Image (cartoon, helix red, strand yellow):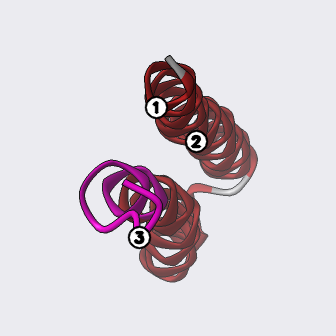
């Protein structure tokens, strides 16, 4: 019985890690896109420089989601407690 509760808590932890990481990455990418769009609307001449920073910001925000995925996979498949 204790093993079932432990497995359930591991699954909940894995779901929360990928869910919250995905939520955070989505908010971050949306914020970067909004800022880039507003910057381009105000000053279209800086488009090449702004695109570099926008892509870099989106990649950094997406890395948070990848960290959440790694944590959830570790919890599900490399858990020493099971």
CA neighbours of label 2 inside 10 A, class few (<14), some (14 to 19), many (20+) = many
Q: Residue at x 58, y 41 (%)?
A: 17
Is residue 54 shown above or below 41?
Answer: below
Question: Label 3 to label 2, Cα distance in Å?
Answer: 18 Å
- Which one is in front, 10 or 26? 10
Residue occupying the point 24% across, 57% down? 77
Find residue 27 and report its image quarter. Answer: top right
Q: Which percent across, then down, holds residue 79? A: 39, 63
Query: In the image, which disc is placed on residue 17?
Result: 2
Residue at point 59%, 35% (across, down): 13
Foreground: 41 or 52? 52
Q: Nearer the viewer, mark 1 or mark 3?
A: 1
Q: Residue furthest front?
A: 1
x%, y% of residue 54?
53, 65
Pointer 3: what residue? Answer: 80
Q: Which residue is mark 1?
A: 3
Mark 1 neighbour density, 10 Å: few (under 14) some (14–19) many (20 or more): few
Give the residues drawn in magenta, as a range: 71-82
Mark 3 secondary-structure assignment: loop
Is tag 3's residue or tag 2's residue first in the polypeptide sequence? Answer: 2
Q: Is residue 79 magenta?
A: yes
Q: Which label sits in the foreground, 1 or 2?
A: 1
- Measured as percent of width and height from the top left, residue 73 is found at 31, 56
Could you tell me how many numbered marks the image carries? 3
Q: Secondary structure at mark 1?
A: helix
Few, some or many residues within 10 Å of mark 3 (<14, 14–19, 20+): few
Label 1–label 3 contact, CB within 8 A: no
Element type at mark 2: helix
- Real-space CA distance between mark 1 and mark 3, rounded to the nearest whole angstrom: 13 Å
Q: Earlier in the sequence, mark 1 or mark 2?
A: 1
């Amino acid at each position: 019985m204790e093993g079932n509760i432990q497995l359930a808590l591991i699954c909940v932890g894995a779901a929360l890690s990928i869910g919250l990481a995905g939520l955070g990455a989505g908010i971050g990418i949306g914020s970067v896109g909004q800022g880039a769009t507003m910057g381009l609307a105000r000053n279209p001449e800086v488009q090449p420089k702004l695109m570099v920073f926008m892509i870099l910001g989106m990649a950094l925000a997406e890395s948070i989601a990848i960290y959440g995925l790694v944590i959830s996979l570790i919890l599900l498949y490399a858990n020493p407690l099971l």
